[in-house]
Amino acid sequence: MAQVTLKDVTKIYDGDVLAVEQVDFQIPDESFTVLVGPSGCGKSTILRMIAGLEEITEGDIYIDDQRINDIPPKDRDIAMVFQNYALYPHMTVYKNMAFGLKLRKYPKKEIEQRVNEAAEILSISHLLNRKPKHLSGGERQRVAVGRAIVRHPKVFLFDEPLSNLDAKLRVQMRMEISRLHDRLNATIVYVTHDQVEAMTMGDQIVVLNEGEIQQIADPGTLYHKPANRFVGGFIGTPPMNFIETHIVNDSGAATLKFENFEMALDPRLQSVLNGVSGDSVTLGIRPEDIHIGLNGGNSVATQVELVEPLGNHALLYLRTDENSFVAQSDLIDVPHHNAPLTVSFNMDKAHLFHPETGNSLCL
């Protein structure tokens, strides 16, 4: 397999549309790296530049030590799996998987061996004589993956391959692609807008927004130590709650105040505020860190707007006079719609962000 390196890569369309701006990161050998972000953030553009399907406006891309900017796509030793499968409808599964090898004039015996090995890995050996119209969506996706596997490429590129599948099949295919990575020890670059896919599949996640990298980290770090407000709000379902607060220093120990509620801070956050210039910060707190009732202080009186039972837990949509936020609760004593409810914030798990830049103050 191989290591992929992007150095100050920029992509500009039509002279003035900035799609990707000075992206600089490394995809380690045999890693499963996920590019994730909202639509239009530049993730698919980066993937297509690695594949050679988009020209690079500025910067360089390397596979191992070889600069590939000017190398044609067919010579980059990369295999790409597309969102729409891109199978030839008039060919059988076997011929679809073998087609690329035939173009490269591989011996017939080697083609047969590679196709059969890939089909066995993906459990589609019994489908080799069928045509795509006789396959389910999941089976077609396996064939598309198999077509990439037979090439034994240095790098696999996946461009939102599961977005056309239903929810249950997406979960199954996530597991299969992850197992495939473990079995092949492959270098995989995977693009998705679904942060759940990113968190469950990637060992390195690159979070993008508006063509810029927001944070590169493993799933646990992204969730527990977001670099900025965007990452905190994008990673996690439901997303992190954000509340604009004022810093109060009346008693010698700083607290955070919003409306008529005052939040006491642990030593960690006290030390964070010591380096803050200004009198306000953005408080970030995840739904699971907001508890029903009085639980160590930091209580907030709210009104329940909506309750969403989700099997083993419920989401509570709450409001105060000026703020709305979401709490997560078990199913014991779930309140009714429009009922008053006192909750408490677990400030040991809270995050603080700069009110203007959005950068985390806790890193």
Image: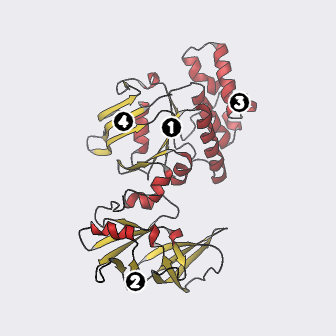
In the image, farthest residue toward the left: 277
Mark 4 or 2 closer to N-term?
A: 4
Quickly name the residue at label 1. 31
Tell me how far mark 4 sits from mark 2, CA to CA: 47 Å
Label 3 or label 1, whichever comes before in sequence order: 1
Coordinates of residue 210 in the picture (x, y in percent):
35, 51
The residue singled out by tag 2 in the image is: 261
Q: Quadrant of the C terminus?
A: bottom left
Q: Amino acid at mark 3?
A: Glu
- Left or right side of 30 for 314: right
Residue receiving disc 3: 120
Q: CA distance from mark 3 to mark 1?
A: 23 Å
Residue 21 percent location from the top left of the image: 30, 44
Q: Residue at x 68, y 19 (%)?
A: 112
Cα separation between marks 4 and 3? 34 Å
Residue 66 to residue 175: above or below:
above
Mark nearest the camera among 3 and 1 is: 1
Q: Nearer the viewer, residue 142 or 348?
A: 348
Name the spot of residue 254 as percent of width and height, x first. Answer: 32, 77
Q: Which mark is residue 60?
A: none
Disc on the earlier residue, 1 or 2: 1
Mark 3 closeness class: few <14, some 14–19, many ≥20 residues within 10 Å: few
Q: Is residue 27 left or right of residue 150?
A: left
Quarter where residue 123 is shown? top right
